[in-house]
Image (cartoon, grey):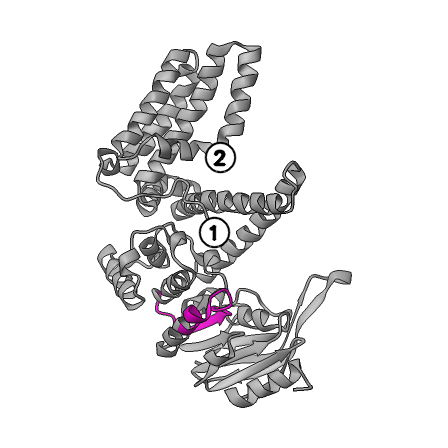
Amino acid sequence: MRTSSLGLFRPGQSPIHRLPPGTKLLVLLVLGAASVVTQRWWWLVAALVVASVLAYRLAGWGVRLWWTQLRPLWMLLAFTAVVHALTSGWQRAVADTGTIVVLVACAALVTLTTPTTALVDTIVRMAAPLTRFGVDPERVGLFLMVGIRCVPLVAGLAEQVREAQIARRATTSTRAFVVPLVVRSLREADALGEALVARGIDD
Amino acid sequence: MRIELERVSHTFGDGSTARTVLRDVTLTLTERRIGVIGHNGSGKSTFLRLLNALIVPTSGRVLVDGLDTARDARELRRRIGFLFTDPDAQIIMPTVSEDIAFGLRRSGLSPERVDARVRDLLVRFGLDAHAGHPAHLLSGGQKQLLALAAVLITKPLALVMDEPTTLLDLRNAAMIGRVVADLDQTVILATHHLDLLAGFDRVLVFHEGRVVADAPPAAAIAAYRHLMDPES
């Protein structure tokens, strides 16, 4: 089965690659929390969008890879921008759409510049204090691993369903897209679960 | 390794949707190379999943070296690795070396020993040049080799393989066949590529949930061909 390479780690020696995974996750967390405040100033959000593009440049890539991470969301971005522009003005449209762009692009940059194992090990270490509340840190790491695995998997499935839709000339039917995508995603989830059990990740 | 099935039946679903896929199978397997053949839906995959405790029988019991699959599933999965038809379903981590190492996450081995084992397998299966590459970008044959390496990293005593060559072309299927032939482990292999069974000790033919032939490869394959096409 074909899968998309969206958000998958790309080796490199850039300053962003060399940053500790914990630092990158912290920056992402701060950006997410700060977005509640930064949304008030459209020009600040616009500057952050430009900064996110520059961060991709610093990591050794260009605007094309930045856009590749956002492309699957273009309909959502366009919808958000149009609705806000019509109801609240262009400044609000820039601020809200830009916030989504910054957060998605930066989250993708973290996974693009950090090996999954390093990311998971960091999360497992960060979740260690939760052991006293009965939370298994390894299981938290497993959730993250499966989540990261599922992003390109579902993106690849969506692409296949879309192609099948075009081949059968059902290009305008939302149902013809959503139903097979959900069914195939559930089937893949089942297979992934069985593989995890077969590989001893069952406790 | 000694595998015993005692009057094993398995039914999926219940009520009007119930479908019995294995019927009263009793077997003792001790050979190192065991083939499993049969048409689609004959019960092969269910039989294989029972051996690895991925499912437990609706009735009867499955014992592997005395361990009951219904009670000792975790220990059993340490001893028996499972290779799926579709390697994509088995790949969990994004890169080749990370996926091979994944099975040892909770093993307690030092990172150096894990790395050494991963390197050995990468070299053995000719994947060393792809160590840091995204796993999903490998060819079909390489993906199946990766899936096999990911199973072998935990050093299982036996390998159960559910049609590992079905999605591969003839060249890659032959390559997987050669790799399987060289394995030290006990192998139980279901396949539609009948030539992979040359040199096997024993072949089981499944038909409608029952073992209808149990013989060396040539005799079992002849029985299977006759079953599929009685005119031949």
Which residue in the structure is indicated by mark 1?
A: A2
The answer for how far apart the CA atoms under marks 1 and 2 are is 17 Å
Chain name for mark 1: A
Query: Which of the labelled discs sits on residue B122, or is there none?
Result: none
Q: Is residue B101 visible?
A: yes
Q: Nearer the viewer, residue B63 or B216?
A: B216
Query: Could you say where residue A163 lies in the image, as x and y percent from the top left?
Result: 56, 45
State the extent of the magenta-drawn residues as a range.
B154-174
Residue type, numbered disc 1: Arg
Q: Is residue A21 covered in magenta?
A: no
Snapshot quadrant of residue B1 = bottom left
Q: Residues within 10 Å of mark 1 (few under 14, many from 20)?
A: some
**Which residue is found at the position 29% from the left and 55% from the top?**
B131
Q: Secondary structure at mark 2?
A: helix
**Which residue is found at the position 62% from the left and 70% from the top?**
B40
Pointer 1 or 2: first along the chain: 1
Residue type, numbered disc 2: Pro
Q: Is residue A90 above or below residue A54?
A: above
Query: Could you say where residue B177 lies in the image, as x and y percent from the top left?
Result: 41, 75
Q: Secondary structure at mark 1?
A: loop
Q: Is residue B155 covered in magenta?
A: yes
Circle count:
2
Which residue in the structure is indicated by mark 2?
A: A72
Query: Could you say where residue B2 lies in the image, as x and y percent from the top left?
Result: 47, 81
Same subunit, labels 1 and 2: the answer reads yes
A146 on left or right of A119: right
**Which residue is found at the position 50% from the left and 64% from the top?**
B167
